[in-house]
Structures are given as structure tokens and as C-alpha cells.
Image (cartoon, rainbow, N blue to C red):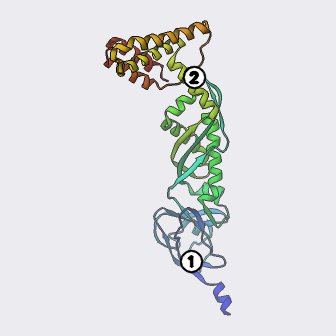
Amino acid sequence: MGILDFLSKQFVDVIDWVEEPGQLGWRVPLADREIQNGAQLTVREGQIAAFFNEGRIADMFGPGLYTLDTSTLPLLTAIMNWDKGFKSPFKSDVYFFSEKEQIGLKWGTAQPVTLRDPELGPLRVRAFGSYSFRVNEVAPFASRIMGTLGEVKVADIEPQLRAAIQTALATGVAGGGTAFLDLAASQTALSEALRAAVAPAFAQWGLSVESFFVESLSLPEEVQKHLDKASSMRVLGDLDRYAKFQAAEAIETAAAQSGGVAGIGAGAAAGLAIGQAMTGALGGAAAAPAPAEDPFALIEKLHKLLDIGALTQAEFDTKKAELLGRIR
């Protein structure tokens, strides 16, 4: 026998896998080499080793050190009719799989998803976040993902996983009839809903969703501007109420000037006159959008008027409750 013939017939007596970050599955490159009877198999924490016969799993091993013989390979022994202890080398496809959690993965909507909002009508929503997964069941992962490949990494299946997430977002959430404002208000609840919607798709590949987070939920810029304007109008109310607030600001400004409280009358009169003139000119028509102002800022101004005695405590409490009741 020549040296090349000897090398081609060498036997494998140690089988192990030192995995690299991002690896999910790896086939031991046995080629024409055969596994020695009594060979040592080392399976590290977070790994599963599987022996295959004609594409089907025979025996599987969790973390530990094993000596390969008929006692440790019962299914393969039965398949190959080793009714007695075998002494010669044998051939088998050997795969390793990582059960470690793959963390820090990103997902996002490549195209906006249409949400049928019960209040605002159809909305085009974008969403982004992160997730993690791990190989949970070897059999479906081996048959549907690994196949005859020599190696599978996270990067190899990420596009498929992101597509499954976008589909879940479109069917599980967009068609759920929940208002956008309610979704955005509770991203924790939305994250859990999406995780539940994504889980079945991942499970068909033998994967489990370990964590799922929605980090951003947004609308197109022009739609967001419209919502901001509508929100501002709900807070400020009609033009008459807006004019009264302008008058209150004039009172506060006059009180802070050198004329002190003496200047309040002129400031208040000016503010009310402006409001009355605008109201009269419009003749009861729909008011133009008033400048948006944070309702909490308005409450702060009212509190200042309370401090200088321009409002009673009862008036302040009533106005504060009214403003808080309009915040959505």
C-alpha cells in the first residue's frame, strides 16, 4: 500500500467542534475517512452532535465525552445490523449544532406596512427593533435549513428570518384593528404580540424566538405633521378659548414689567380686544389652526397666574383638569 493509499484510509479517532461566533451547524468533514471503533466524541456546552444514516438522524449526543461503540450508538447499531460488538471502522455523517442564543440581531420593515387604523384610516407604518433566537429542535433545522450543506451561519438565514418578521407584522398586527396611537403607547405589549406572531414561522425551521423588541414605530413625515396639528387644535380648542389664553399671557407679561399689577388692565384689554376682533372677522367660520403649544406649558402659565393672584385656586383647578382631559 502506497503512502497516498494509507492517508486516504486513515481513521478518525477524535471528533469535536470548536465553533466560531455566528455558526449554527457544521458537518464534520470526514470525506473518505472512517470513524474508528472506540473513537472519542467531545460535545461542549451549548452543542448537540448527531449521527446520520442516509440523511436521517440516528443517534444524538448532548454535552459530554463519549466513547463510540455499540452501547453509545444504539440506533445506528440497529440500522447497520451490528448485533454483535463491531471492531472495524464505520462510516456515518456527523453534524454538530449550536444551541446557544444568537443575540443582537436587527429587524426592520423594508417597505412600510399598511395599518387599518379604526380612527385615522389606512396608515403606512414603519417599525424597527432587535431580536434573538436559538436552535431549539435539531430535526427540522437539519432537514429544512442544514440539508447537505457543510456549514450554516446566522448570516445565511437572517434574510429569511427578517422576511418572516415582516410578514408577521403585516398579518398579525396590521390586520388586528388596533389604533396606531395605542400600539405606539405600549411598545412592550406590541413586542410581545409580534413575538407570538413570529414564533410559529421560526418553529417550522426548528428555531425558537428568545427575545423580541420593538424599538421604533413611525409614520410618514407628512402624516405625523397632520397628527401633530390635529392634536394641537384639540388641546387649544376654539378660537375664543385661544384668545382668552392669549389674554392670560398678556396679564402675566404686564405683571412682570415695571408697571407691576397696574399694567395688567392694559395687557388684558389688548389681548381680549385682539381675540374679539379675530372672532368677529371670521363670523363664526371655522378657525384657522392656532399655533401649537404644549398643554403642560399652558398649565405652567396658568400656575404663574395663580401665584400672582390673577386666578383663584378653583379656576386654576378647573382649567388644569380640562387641559389634562384633552391629552390623548
Number of marks in picture: 2
Q: Are marks 1 and 2 in contact (CB under 8 Å)?
A: no
Q: Nearer the viewer, mark 1 or mark 2?
A: 2
Image location (x, y in percent) of residue 38: 51, 78
Cα separation, mark 1 vs mark 2, equals 81 Å
Which residue in the structure is indicated by mark 1? Answer: 86
Q: Which residue is mark 2?
A: 230
> In the figure, is residue 106 to the left or right of 322?
right
x 58%, y 6%: residue: 280
Q: Position of residue 161 (x, y in %)?
A: 62, 50
Front residue of 262 and 292: 262
Image quadrant in which the N terminus is located: bottom right
Q: Residue at x 54, y 50 (%)?
A: 208
| Residue type at numbered disc 2 | Ala
314 left or right, relative to 48: left
Instruction: Give whichever of 17, 92 is nearer the camera.
Output: 17
Mark 2: few/some/many CA within 10 Å (<14, 14-19, 20+): few
> Could you tell me residue 93's position as x and y percent?
62, 69
Can the viewer see residue 142? no
- Viewer can see residue 72: yes
Label 2: element kind: helix
The residue lying toward the viewer, choosing from 272 and 72, is 272
Q: Earlier in the sequence, mark 1 or mark 2?
A: 1
Q: Residues within 10 Å of mark 1 (few under 14, many from 20)?
A: few
